[in-house]
Structures are given as C-alpha cells and as structure tokens.
Amino acid sequence: MQDIIDLFLNIRMRDIIDILIVACAFYKLFMLIRETRAEQLTKGIILLFIATKISEWIKLYTVYWILEKTMTVGILAILIVFQPELRRALEYLGRSRFFAKSFVEVKEETVNKVVDEIVDAVASLSRQKIGALIVIEKQTGLNEVVETGTRINGLVSSGLLINIFIPNTPLHDGAVVIKEDIVKAAGCFLPLTDNASLSKELGTRHRAALGISEKSDSLAIVVSEETGAISIADKGNLSRYLDAKTLKQILIELYKPNEQKQSFIGKWRRKDEQREEE
C-alpha cells in the first residue's frame, strides 16, 4: 500500500502530460479504425500477442517459438495490411485545422450561392430520374481523379451540372468534381468500394461514391437513375432517400466543426438503416 502511495506522490506534471498525450493518441487511433476491417485485424493481433505470452509463461517452447517468429515477421505484414489505414491516419493529420482552413472560412460569402446551385441541380435531376454523381473536394486533394476526366474549371451553376449529366452526352457517365465554387472536371472515374456487405440493388454510382469517400474526406452526392433517389456518401457511409431540404442543410453544415456535421448526417444515416431493416 505504501508503495502505491509513494508512486502517486512522485508523479510529476510532465508525467501527467505524457500519459494524457499517449491516451489521446490511442483514442484517436481507435476512432480511426473503428468499424473498419482494421478493427478486426487489431483484435487478431492482440489475441496473437496474448497467446505468445501465455505460451512463454507455461513453457510451451515449440508454440512460443512459432508465435514469436510470427510476431517478428508480422511487423512487415502489418505495414502492408494496414496501408489504407496508415494513409488515412496521415491524411487526418494533414487535414487538421493547424494546416488548413475550411471552405466556409475561405469562401464564406459564396457558400450559400454554391449550395443553392448544387441543390437546384440535384433536385432537377432527381425529378427527371437522371443519374448523377457529384464529388465535393475538401482538404484531401483529388487531382488524380480530376486527371481521369475532362477539365471544366467553370463556376458552379445548376445549368452546367444539369447539362453535364444529360443522357447520351460525352460526360454524363462519369463523376463531377467540385472544389469550393469551381467545377474542376467532369466525366471522372472513381475507385469502387471493396465493401462486400452492400445491398445488391446499389449500382456503380453508389459504389463509386462510397469508394471515393473511403479514400478521401470528400463528400459524394448520388442521384439514382432508376428511382431518382438522392444519396450522399461520407466517410465510407451511405445515407439514402434525402430530399432537397435535407441535402441543403447537410451541404451548409458540411464545413462546420465535425461534432456538428457528424451528428446531423448521423441522424439521417440511422433513419436510412431503419428503412432498410423494415
């Protein structure tokens, strides 16, 4: 008991700061891998580590030797397997407010106009059941995506967006990339998601929207060609059956602090999950 008391008495302020930094780092790491395949892989690694220690304690020498060599070689395997998550973590650091300002801070006076133009175009496309895929670039650059399409570099307008997605036109099959108030390119190719649990009724546009939201912090808007339903993909999650009013609220709040926009989008995501269960 006295040893514990002495331990607490000898704790210095720098020790507390050290513990808080490590705790914060582990919390952020957990939030990054939560509900991803990395979460399951992490559990497997922890179980492997526990099995290695247990085999050492009870002197199962052959088992311990195999597990120890597996853990040693596993460091390289971890770097390969966790490459997408490591990239995501580094992008998260690069997107921190220390390095960049949000769209609202940089172009606050243009936000409402841009949002209105996008919503008007999406609502019109939805009524006409014309398929569309619009990607809004945020902090993660999408130049590699832009290079796969045709450069536009024109101001965002509902007329421009509608005309791009009119069937049988050269650019209607690809995605439009928007940065701030500029349509950077159209007819762009996006990476498809690897999520095998998606509903079979979701087509290529929805899978491409999820794919780009998994590999960047961008938000993708999808209009279904079959039903005219409006969906958004954000952080690898899909929210479906939005109306124009809801879409406008999401776009306006898109660049507000994370705790505000996540709670709003999360509400619609939960409603979407409830619809699918029904």
Image (cartoon, rainbow, N blue to C red):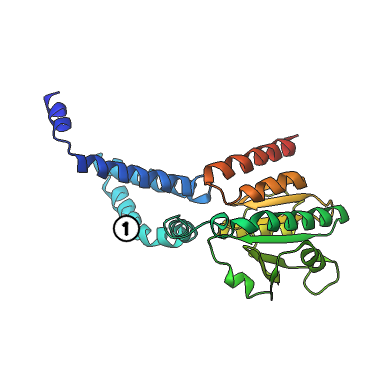
Image vertical order of residue 257 relative to residue 106, above or below: above
Outermost residue toward the top? 1
The quadrant where residue 15 appears: top left
Drawn side of residue 205 relative to residue 142, left or right: right
Residue occupying the point 29% across, 48% down: 64
Give the amino acid at mark 1. Thr
Give percent across and percent down for residue 86. 44, 58
Residue occupying the point 40% across, 48% down: 45
Image vertical order of residue 150 relative to residue 27, above or below: below
Q: Nearer the viewer, residue 166 or 84?
A: 166
The quadrant where residue 70 appears: bottom left
Q: Is residue 158 visible?
A: yes
Which residue bears the numbered disc 1?
A: 72
Label 1 residue SS: helix
Give percent across and percent down for residue 210. 64, 55
Q: Nearer the viewer, residue 101 or 178?
A: 101
